[in-house]
Image (spheres, grey):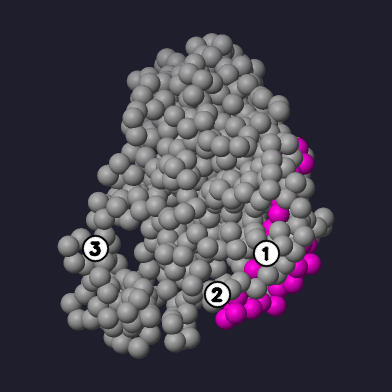
């Protein structure tokens, strides 16, 4: 199903007047608000959307139209029904078309079949769908069959600002493994006005009537059976007019089941979406999302907020996947790609890169056949890493950089608690640690992904941490992440370098000039992998006025640590700075260990009779992951 996350849409009242409402939800349960935040419901007796109030925990119409009355006195903004009422509404089944299997699927953001939905899957090979265009006596469209055919099939398609056609989208994200084309027929004029089909009581009328019209026109259903099972692979109905976001209506974009027989052929999965009032409303996003359910059996990766007593909706994977809110990016013209988790489950990731072996890796953007995986010892729970820089289908993401997903095929994106028993099927480890997606604060922001991080970006002790859902340490550590771009370079720390010690001594015997802030500098190069777990600096100085000195240590990444600034020092013995106990160098823990470490000593006071000397210094580094 296709969810709406606070979009402002136009609705037509029964008398033809139009009203703008903000919509939250999907076809099973939706909440409508006026632009200033007052809740609205459709009142059949008034033939219009009216202001709502709560009575016995349910929305009730006040009878006052939102387009011609002021809000009722005493009714607060942003009313919400409590969880039990939402759950009851969600459990109401559509008459006629919805099978028990589809009803179960629609209630869960859970993939019971190894992370995917149950049912006939067509995620590879050449798949031909049948797309039937329909209009209504009261709702025509200027969209033509050739225009829809181009939207679905044309190579190099960019009309109306779309990134590509539906066929090109799936060929790209599947790495060429899925070739999904559509035969477009119609438009066929339906026998009733659009309001008849939008009525939930008539939910089982549109699809059979549209398919009968196509068959009567000469369409041969055997052309759409790639598996030779006498089942139509992909049945799609696109209707004239704007998308009708009316809850429980057949016209809300969705995927479900209809069991119809035409000779030896039968139907099973179908989808419904709109083609708009004109070609400027043709976009690929929602079509691609529903096709993900229809063909690949992808589950929704957002939280409906009404399962098992859960009345708290959350964003799931937000804008970062086609199967969450990513189909709405760029107004649906440049939808997000299918995330690495679902691509892997679909069998599209034929190259598996094992992060457990450690080392430096390069993740190419748009390399959809490759997946970077960190295994935890449990087949169902693991981590995936993906380059999500602002390129290609990721151009309109709110963030750019490296995405890290915590995956568990036993989870559900309905369960946002993050506990061993109630956690997402796939969670984005948001780099800022704010958990905005789980708390439904947004569907993504600029701090969600890992940009350049010179030191440790993710480990058992960072925020967020790479812990298992049980709370135990997974062992995943990422560091040295490069800038976002076509290729992102990063290190997955191998356990083998944990605890290794590297040390070096330099004896520069450099004279320290008086009253010179630049002073003298000397560099020690450490040939090591991994990051700093512990560090010790020993300095041998000869200076008659050490309180005049400034001593600074520069790490290989350029981080500057001031060891002393015109402080009283005892230079009769070696100066020592160590990460344990905590000292000035403690912030270097987690920084890359390898490279040039530079010590700079400056005399900031006026000239003295004798000059000081940096005789020698030693650097010892213990690496970790």
Q: CA distance from mark 2 to mark 3?
A: 31 Å
- Residue drawn at (48%, 18%) of the image: 378
The residue tagged 3 is 58
Q: Position of residue 98 (x, y in %)?
A: 47, 50
- Residue drawn at (77%, 41%) of the image: 126
Residue 56 relative to residue 242: left or right: left
Q: CA distance from mark 2 to mark 1?
A: 14 Å
Q: Residues within 10 Å of mark 1 (few under 14, many from 20)?
A: many
Tell which residue pokes out farthest to the right in this image. 155
Q: Position of residue 43 (x, y in %)?
A: 33, 76
Q: Viewer-proximal residue, 591 or 104? A: 104
The residue tagged 2 is 192
SS at circle 1: helix
Q: Residue 134: say if magenta.
A: yes
Residue 311 shows in this picture: yes
Q: Residue 423: say if magenta.
A: no
Q: In the displayed structure, would residue 293 be above or below residue 250?
A: above
Residue 399 shows in this picture: no
Q: In the displayed structure, would residue 411 be above or below residue 44?
A: above
Query: Residue 516: which quarter of the image?
Result: top right
The residue tagged 1 is 213
Q: CA distance from mark 1 to mark 3?
A: 40 Å
Residue 55 relative to residue 518: left or right: left
């Amino acid at each position: 199903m296709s969810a709406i996350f606070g979009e402002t849409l136009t609705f037509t009242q029964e008398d033809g007047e139009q009203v703008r409402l903000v919509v939250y939800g999907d076809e099973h349960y939706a909440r409508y608000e006026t632009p200033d935040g007052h809740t609205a419901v459709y009142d059949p007796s008034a033939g219009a959307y009216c202001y709502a109030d709560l009575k016995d925990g349910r929305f009730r119409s006040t009878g006052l139209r939102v387009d011609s009355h002021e809000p009722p006195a005493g009714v607060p903004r942003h009313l919400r029904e409590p969880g039990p009422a939402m759950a009851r509404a969600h459990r109401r089944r559509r008459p006629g078309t919805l099978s028990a299997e589809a009803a179960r699927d629609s209630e869960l953001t859970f993939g019971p079949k190894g992370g995917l939905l149950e049912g006939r899957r067509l995620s590879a090979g050449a798949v031909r769908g049948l797309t039937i265009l329909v209009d209504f006596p009261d709702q025509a469209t200027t969209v033509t069959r050739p225009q829809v055919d181009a939207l679905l099939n044309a190579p190099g398609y960019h009309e109306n600002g779309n990134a590509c056609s539906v066929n090109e989208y799936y060929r790209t994200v599947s790495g060429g493994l899925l070739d999904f084309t559509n035969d477009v027929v119609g438009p066929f004029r339906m026998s009733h006005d659009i309001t008849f089909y939008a009525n939930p009581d008539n939910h089982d009328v549109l699809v059979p009537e549209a398919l009968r019209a196509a068959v009567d026109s000469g369409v041969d259903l055997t052309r759409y059976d790639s598996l030779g099972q006498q089942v139509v692979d992909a049945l799609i109905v696109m209707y004239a007019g704007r998308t009708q976001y009316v809850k429980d209506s057949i016209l809300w974009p969705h995927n479900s089941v209809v069991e119809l027989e035409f000779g030896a052929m039968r139907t099973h999965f179908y989808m419904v979406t709109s083609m708009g009032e004109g070609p400027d409303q043709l976009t690929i996003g929602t079509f691609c999302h529903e096709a993900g359910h229809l063909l690949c059996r992808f589950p929704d990766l957002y939280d409906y907020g009404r399962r098992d007593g859960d009345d708290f909706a959350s964003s799931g994977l937000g804008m970062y996947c086609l199967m969450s809110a990513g189909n709405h990016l760029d107004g649906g013209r440049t939808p997000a790609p299918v995330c690495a988790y679902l691509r892997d489950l679909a069998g599209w990731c034929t190259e598996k890169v094992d992060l457990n072996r450690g080392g430096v890796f390069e993740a190419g953007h748009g390399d959809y056949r490759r997946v970077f995986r960190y295994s935890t010892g449990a087949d169902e729970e693991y981590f995936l890493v993906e380059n999500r820089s602002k390129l290609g289908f990721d151009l309109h993401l709110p963030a750019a950089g490296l995405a890290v997903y915590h995956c568990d095929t036993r989870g559900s994106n309905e369960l946002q608690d993050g506990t061993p028993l109630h956690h997402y099927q796939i969670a984005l480890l948001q780099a800022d640690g704010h958990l905005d997606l789980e708390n439904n604060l947004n569907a993504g922001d600029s701090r969600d992904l890992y940009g350049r991080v010179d030191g440790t970006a993710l480990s058992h002790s960072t925020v967020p941490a790479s812990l298992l859902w049980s709370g135990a340490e997974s062992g995943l550590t990422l560091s040295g992440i490069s800038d976002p771009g076509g290729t992102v370079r990063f290190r997955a720390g191998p356990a083998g370098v944990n605890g290794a010690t590297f040390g070096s001594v330099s004896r520069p015997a450099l004279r320290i000039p008086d009253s010179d802030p630049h002073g003298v500098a000397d560099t020690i190069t450490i040939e090591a992998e991994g990051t700093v777990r512990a560090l010790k600096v020993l300095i041998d100085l000869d200076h008659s006025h050490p309180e005049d000195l400034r001593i600074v240590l520069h790490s290989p990444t350029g981080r500057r640590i001031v060891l002393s600034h015109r402080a009283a020092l005892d230079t009769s013995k070696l100066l020592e700075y160590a990460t344990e106990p905590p000292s000035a160098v403690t912030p270097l823990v987690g920084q890359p260990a390898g490279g040039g470490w530079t010590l700079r000593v400056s005399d900031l006071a006026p000239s003295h009779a004798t000059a000081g000397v940096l005789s020698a210094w030693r650097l010892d580094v213990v690496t970790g992951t």
